[in-house]
Amino acid sequence: MTPVVRQWDQRIKNPMLPQPGSQLSQDNMENLDVDGTIWYQLCVSVEHLNFALDAMYKTRTVYPTAYMTVLRTAYLASVNALWILSGTGRTDRRLRTLRFIAEDTRVHIQAVRELEASEELKSAKQAQLNGLFKQQADLQSVAKELGSTEEVRNMKVNQTSNVAEVAEHFCNSDSSKDLTEAIRFIWRDGSAAAHGQYHFGLSRVKAHEINQGERGARVARLFGDFSRDVGPAFAGIRLILEKSFELYDVACEL
């Protein structure tokens, strides 16, 4: 796996525009950068995957939850890229990109609004908000052009639904159903690790590994599990990225 990830890492450092007239270049619209949105997700995914490999090689340690937290971002970004790329047609790919950017803009507006600004910075804060409101208005025009009546400011990405849809790309026979379910489970497993949820650690402790500590406390030491956590996550992300880059390359060519 490492050589493939290293190749992807070099690739994202040297981006190339889709060929003029290609499917992906024609997907782009004024105020809607389909190609750039997909490419950014691919870059984020590869960056986190490469970082996880660097950390493992340099520390020679499989940490209990840290790798799954990093790999969760790699996983979600790869899913987002494939979700947009696998739209059923140009309009669908554009609408998916629109929804993705619309939610990002809405979250950005919320973050800026919640910032406490001093008197001297209030004008800068308002200027940033005005720019984001302009972006929302431009996206609303894009939505109208694409035939959508949904309010851009209310658009949200259903990440769980996207994960399920992307997983179906790998379900082409009865024997691949386990793979499909495993790809779905990476989403939940990574989320539990990233959010510090207790059940992620508890489910990895066996009864005989619980020791008596001071003052009657029961203590267990957590270990990273490459075969159960990190390995499957790496493999799942690689599958999704391979499919994403395959579709991306086809869409960039004439």
Image: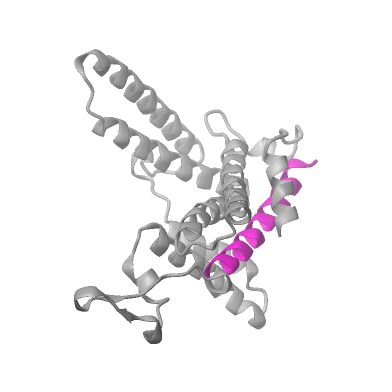
- Farthest residue, direction bottom: 208
**Which residues are drawn in magenta?**
229-254
Image x and y of residue 170, in percent:
64, 69
Query: In the rendered view, would you say 99 is above or below 130?
Result: below
As drawn, is 126 to the left or to the right of 176?
left
Query: Relative to 9, is 37 on the left or the right?
Result: left
Q: Give the answer, above or below, for where 210 lies relative to 79.
A: below
Q: Is residue 208 left or right of residue 21?
A: left
Question: Which residue, as the protein is rendered here, is positioned at the far right?
Answer: 254
Number of marks in the image?
0
The N terminus, quarter of image: bottom right
Residue 130: image location, x then y, percent: 34, 22
**Residue drawn at x 44%, y 62% as measured from the top left:** 65
Q: Is residue 186 above or below residue 143?
A: below
| Prevailing secondary structure class for the magenta stretch in the rendered image | helix
The answer to whether any part of residue 90 appears in the image is yes
Q: Nearer the viewer, residue 173 or 211?
A: 211
Q: Position of residue 137 (x, y in %)?
A: 39, 29
Which quadrant of the view contains residue 213?
Answer: bottom left
For the point 78% across and 42% down, the residue is 253
Between residue 206 and residue 245, name the one nearer to us.
206
Q: Quadrant of the C terminus?
A: top right
- Direction from residue 242 to residue 49 in the image, left or right: left
Residue at coordinates 24% horizontally, 34% vertically from top-left? 114
Q: Where on the picture, by quarter, is residue 4?
A: bottom right
Please say whether residue 17 is one of the residues in the magenta stretch.
no
Whole-percent x and y of residue 79? Answer: 55, 55
Q: Is residue 239 magenta?
A: yes
Res. 23 visible in picture: no
